[in-house]
Image: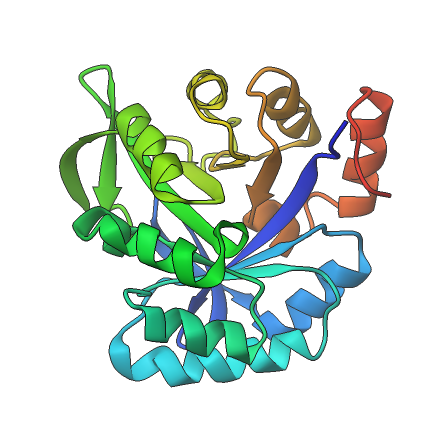
Amino acid sequence: MLTKRIIPCLDIKNGRTVKGVNFVDLRDAGDPVELAEIYAQNGADELVFLDISATEEKRKTLAELVMRVAQKINIPFTVGGGISSVEDVELLLNSGADKVSINSSAVKNPQLINELAAKFGSQCIVVAIDAKQIDGEWIVHLVGGKVPTNIKLFDWAKEVEQRGAGEILFTSMDHDGTKNGFANEALARLGSLVNIPIIASGGAGNMQHFVDTFKDGKADAALAASVFHFKEIDIVDLKKELKNNDIEVRI
């Protein structure tokens, strides 16, 4: 049985880690390099870095940050934010990232998924999907959750798998930062529709929420930010709790 993964997420803005609620009201959460090192030492399985204010001129700044992080940690890490070309991916992978996450650019140009998977391999292409429920339907949103599309979550998930994505990072915008638990019903449905790993994101507030998303949501990995950044949950303790609930994790 594959072990379930615990993934701290560092949202990066202007070189600092930040955290908000429902994608807004950001507050500072520390230096990303220091946090990355602490998480790697404390049992995180992977890290995700998302440059939430990414623009073209910041790409080199992000690459420098990636390089600094890669020198400090020995676990895989994924970098996302404003990635829209083969060149962007090449720069980040060469700087030390193990995977890249694409979101808005994949929706605007789905062929990009095919191109990146063909050039770099599916194993390092993560497609992030931000979605919220509108009139009972899960609808994909872009630009950090600000712009709704007419694309349905489950249709898009199947398409990105067919195009070569190696993983899906699904964030429920309705749950993000609320600490009320993950969107387990939607996660379980996603897991039944695709054969690539699903990372659950949005809503972690206590250890039971992680147990629930692995058991009820069938998630392959669970990503969280503020509960780790502000030391509300310790990863070592969390993994013990998961083990106690017969969930396989790397200790």
Residue at left offset 79%, top offset 36%:
249
For the view shown, which residue lies furthest in the front direction? 118
Q: Quadrant of the N terminus?
A: top right
Task: Count how many numbered circles sit on residues in the image.
Answer: 0
Residue at left offset 71%, top offset 61%:
75
Vertical position of residue 227 compared to residue 86: above or below: above
Vertical position of residue 115 compared to residue 180: above or below: below
Residue 35 found in image quarter: bottom right
Q: Is residue 50 visible?
A: no
Nearest to the observer: residue 26 or residue 46: 46
Q: Position of residue 229 (x, y in %)?
A: 62, 56
Q: Position of residue 72 (x, y in %)?
A: 72, 76
Vertical position of residue 137 compared to residue 37: above or below: above
Q: Position of residue 74 (x, y in %)?
A: 75, 66
Relative to residue 56, is residue 88 drawn left or right? right
Q: Position of residue 213 (x, y in %)?
A: 59, 24
Nearest to the observer: residue 81 or residue 33: 81
Residue at left offset 66%, top offset 53%:
46
Q: Is residue 192 visible?
A: yes
Residue at left offset 45%, top offset 35%:
178
Relative to residue 180, is residue 156 drawn left or right? left
Q: Quadrant of the C terminus?
A: top right
